Image (tube, rainbow, N blue to C red):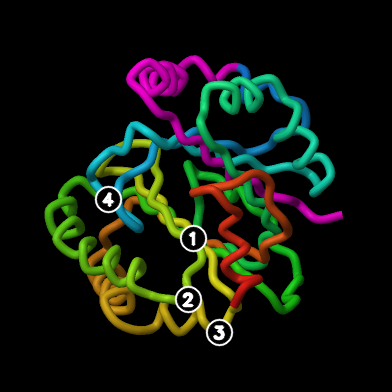
Amino acid sequence: MSQTVTLSFFRFAGFSARAWALMMMGAARGPLGKTPDIGFWKLCGSGVGQGFNVTFNPSVIAILAVWPDAETARNRVENAPVFAKYRSRAVESWSVLLTPTSVRGQWDGSAPFAATADQSPGPMAALTRAAIKRRIIPRFWRQVPDISANIGADPNVAFKIGIGELPMLDQVTFSIWPDKATMDAFARTGPHGAAIKAVRAGDWFAEELFARFTVHSDMGTWGGASPLSKLEAA
């Protein structure tokens, strides 16, 4: 039995639905924390574009949650009242189930993911979270547009999004790739590789976390289809 992480996305259309989603950034915290079997969790807004982005997108909300196993994860995301309430207001929703395979760093002072030895072939996901030091903000955001454009231009990436808890200061990028080799190749080259070197040399982050996952399964659609269908077609 392996820890399972879910990342759920909800898309809202129209002023009233978006206003409700914004209100729920505070109101949903109690119900989420009381959901049976939930471990570490985060309620996040999203940015426009492909990765880290300073511009808030009011149409998309994300919930990251940790569960003891895949069966529990699927059951809670499908049936827990707080998830059902989000789905009832959203025009579209999609959840991906993930198994952590490597984790480095912390999130709010804790290690949220328990890595397993699972290295089975197939799609993999990468999550990077950074709490940016205030003195570094201008330099960081000068670097980001090149990285985001590079992710969006890569034909191998099946899904990519930038989410976060605090605009400008707390950023998460999440992407899904066909395999480990493809994901590694992107991480080592171009603007992304240069940014990693700059981060390590300049001590940019107050806290950081890098995690990789095998993709277990998904539920729902995003843009009218499962993002994983791109990988199946390829």
Q: Would residue 86 be seen by someone viewing this image from the given angle?
A: yes
- Give me the C-alpha separation between circle 1 and circle 2: 9 Å
Is residue 185 rendered to the left or right of residue 138? right
Read off the residue under disc 2. 156
Residue 159 badge: 1
Q: Is residue 117 above or below residue 57?
A: below
Q: Amino acid at mark 3?
A: Ala
Within 10 Å of the Cα at label 4, are there few (<14), some (14-19), or many (20+) other Cα atoms? Answer: many
| Image location of residue 172, percent across then percent down | 41, 51
CA gap, disc 3 to disc 2?
A: 11 Å
Q: Residue at x 56, y 58 (%)?
A: 227
**Residue at 47% over, 57% down:** 174
Quarter occupied by the C terminus: bottom right
| Residue situated furthest right in the rendering | 1
Range of residues picked out in magenta:
1-30
Give, as a three-letter code, the residue at label 2: Asn
Amino acid, disc 1: Phe
